[in-house]
Amino acid sequence: MADPDKRFNLSAIDDAKAVIEQAKIDARKPQDRRSMGRLVALSNLPWLMGIVAWVWWTWFK
């Protein structure tokens, strides 16, 4: 006789709960802040370039 499909077994519920609990634990772990700092620096780059261009324009006009 063939084995019953796992998705119809009650152990699939326990497996799904274990996956959800592990995802909650992983979500609480601190993330790498170094990569976030680089992203913030890149978002500030256009402002910095604009300020430098404005200073250059007003100083050497």
Image: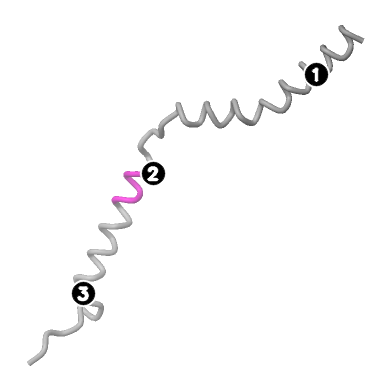
Q: Tell me if mark 2 has few (under 14), some (14-19) or many (20+) residues whose alpha carbon lies within 10 angstroms of its own.
A: few
Which residue matches tag 2? 27
Task: Please tell me which residue lies in front, 43 or 12.
Answer: 43
Question: As drawn, which residue projects farthest toward the left?
Answer: 1
* Lower sequence index among marks 3 and 1: 3
Above or below: residue 40 compared with residue 18? above
Q: Quadrant of residue 3?
A: bottom left
Furthest-right residue in view?
Answer: 61
The magenta-colored residue range is: 22-27
Instruction: Classify mark 1: helix, strand or loop.
Output: helix
Q: Amino acid at mark 1?
A: Ala
Quarter holding the C terminus?
A: top right
Per the image, label 3 sits on a secondary structure element best described as loop
Q: Earlier in the sequence, mark 2 or mark 3?
A: 3
**Dot 3: few (<14), some (14–19), or many (≥20) neighbours within 10 Å?**
few
Residue at 7%, 92% in the rendered image: 1
For residue 10, which numbered disc appears in the image? 3
- Residue 53: mark: 1
3D distance between C-alphas at marks 2 and 3: 27 Å
The local crowd at label 1, few if under 14, some if 14 to 19, many if 20 or more residues have their Cα within 10 Å, is few
The amino acid marked with disc number 3 is: Leu
| Numbered disc 2: secondary structure | helix
